[in-house]
Image (cartoon, grey):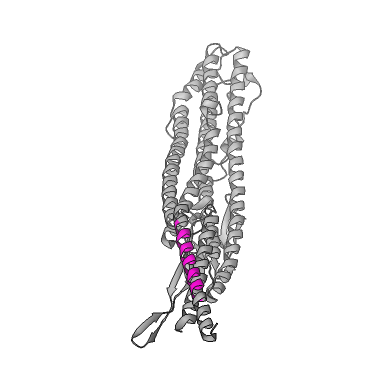
Amino acid sequence: MGGLMGSLQIAVQSLLAQQGALEVTSNNIANANTPGYSRQIAIFQEEGSIIEGSLTFGEGVSLQQIQSVRDSVLNLQLDQATGAQSQVDAYLGGMNQVATVFNETQGSGLQNVISQFFNSFQQLSTNPTDPTLRQAVLTAGQNLATAFNQASTALGQIRTSLDQSVVQDVGQVNQLTSQIAALNPQIAAAQAAGQSTGSLIDQRDQLISQLSGLVDTSVTDAGNGNVTVTTANGSPLVVGDQSFALTTQVDPQTGTQHVFSQGTDITESIQSGDLGGLIQARDQGLAQAQTGLDNLAAGLIGSVNTQSAQGYDLSGAAGGNFFVPFTPAAAGSNAGAAAQFAVAITDPSQIAASSDGTAGSNGNALALANLANSGIINGQDPGDFYSNFVAGIGNQVSTATAQQTATGLVVTQLQNQQTNVSGVSLDEEAANLQMYQNAYNASAQVVAAINTLTQTTINMATGA
C-alpha cells in the first residue's frame, strides 16, 4: 500500500514490533534471577515489498517470534555432570557414615578392644590362678563381643537408612516423570498453534535436570515438541504424554530394596544420580565393610576357640569354647558372624589358661595371647587385618572426596557456560531496552508526522 496510509501502517507495525521487543526485554530483566530461566530474544522479520513503477518500497517490520536462547548439547552435558555429582555425593555420604563406625580417633573402632582382649591373656599368664585377672579376661571378651555387635548393628542401621533413601528417590523420580509427561503435550500443542513455548520448555528442562540428579537419564527429541526420557540402559521413563513409574521391591536374598522398571530389575544398571550413589554405597562400599567385619569376627571366634580347646581350665578340665561357635549359613560365607559374636562362658574358672592341666600352668594363656601376632585372619594377624580393613574404607572415602571435588568443578564450569548462553545479562538488556525505546519513539514520531501531513492534505482538499 503506497501513500500516507501505507506509511502510517508501516509506522504502526513498527510500534507494535518494538513494543513486543520491549515486553521481551522487560520479561528478561524480571527473570534475571529465576532458576532455569532461558533469556528470550525478539526475532524481527522484514515485511514484503511493493513495486511502483521502477521503485520498490518496503512494507515495514513485524515481530515474527519470541525465541528462547538455549544450547541443547550443553544442557545435556550439564545434566550428565549433575548426575555424576549427585552420584558421588550420595556415595560419599553413605561411606562417611560407614567410616564413622570405625573411627579410632573418636573411640568407635575395634582396634583398642582387640588389643585389650589379647593383652588380658598376657596379663593372666603372669598369674593364671588370680580370679581378678581371670575376670578381666572374661570382661575383655565380653567387651570385644559387644563392640562387634554394635559395629554390625550400626552398619545395619546405615543399610536401612540407605534403603529408605532408595525408596524415597524412586518416589521422586516418578513424580518428576509424571510432570514431564504432562508438559510434553502442552508444548506440542503450543508449537502447533504457533505460540511461544519458552517458559514451558524451561519448566521441562528444570524437571529433567532434577531427574538427572536422581537417576542416569537419556533424553531424545521425539519431534513436535515432545521428548522421550529413558534410563541409561534404555528403560522407559517418559514417552509422549505417558510416564512409566519405577517400583521398589525387597530382594529375598539380600533383604534390600531393588529397583524395577516394567517388572525388570534394573538395580545394577543404575550408575548415576543420587539413586546410583545410594545403591553403590549400600551394595558395594557398605557390603564390603560388613563382609570384612564378619570375616574378622569369624576368624577371631574360630581361632580363639581352637586354641582354647588345646588347654585346661582352673579345675583341670579340658578347655571348651571361649566364644559361642559361629556356624555359617552358607558355605564360604561368614555373614552374620559379627552380629552373633558372644562369649560362651560365664565362669572365669573355665578359662583354659593351663597347657598341662595344672592350676599354675600359663602355657595356653600365652598361646592365646600370641594369637594377636598370628596370621589367623586370611593370613594376617588381627591387628594388621583390621588396620588394612579400616584403611580400605578410608581410601574409598578419600577417592570419593577427590571425585566430588572434580565433578563439582565440571558442574560449575558447565553452569557458567550455560549462563553465558542462556543467562540474562542486565547490561545487555539495558542496552536493548534503550535501543527498542529509541525505535519506538522514532516510529511514534513517524505516526505524528503522517498525522500532520494527513491533516494538512485534508485541509487543502476542503480549502480550510
Q: Is residue 310 visible?
A: no
Q: Residue furthest right?
A: 346
Rendered location of residue 115, percent (x, y): 51, 22
Q: Is residue 295 above or below residue 220?
A: above
Task: Say if the magenta span includes residue 463.
Answer: no
Q: Residue at x 47, y 80 (%)?
A: 4
Q: Is residue 164 above or below residue 384?
A: below
Q: Residue at x 60, y 17 (%)?
A: 136
Please indicate whether residue 131 sits to the left or right of residue 95 in the image.
Answer: right
Rendered location of residue 305, percent (x, y): 55, 29
Rendered location of residue 360, percent (x, y): 55, 12
Quarter in which the C terminus is drawn: bottom right
**Number of numbered labels in the structure image:** 0
Rendered location of residue 183, percent (x, y): 58, 66
Name the residue nearer the viewer: 70 or 173.
70
Name the residue nearer the viewer: 342 or 344.
342
Q: Which residues, given as a range, are shown in magenta?
A: 431-450
Q: Residue furthest left?
A: 54
Dominant SS of magenta comes to helix
Q: Is residue 179 above or below residue 103?
A: below
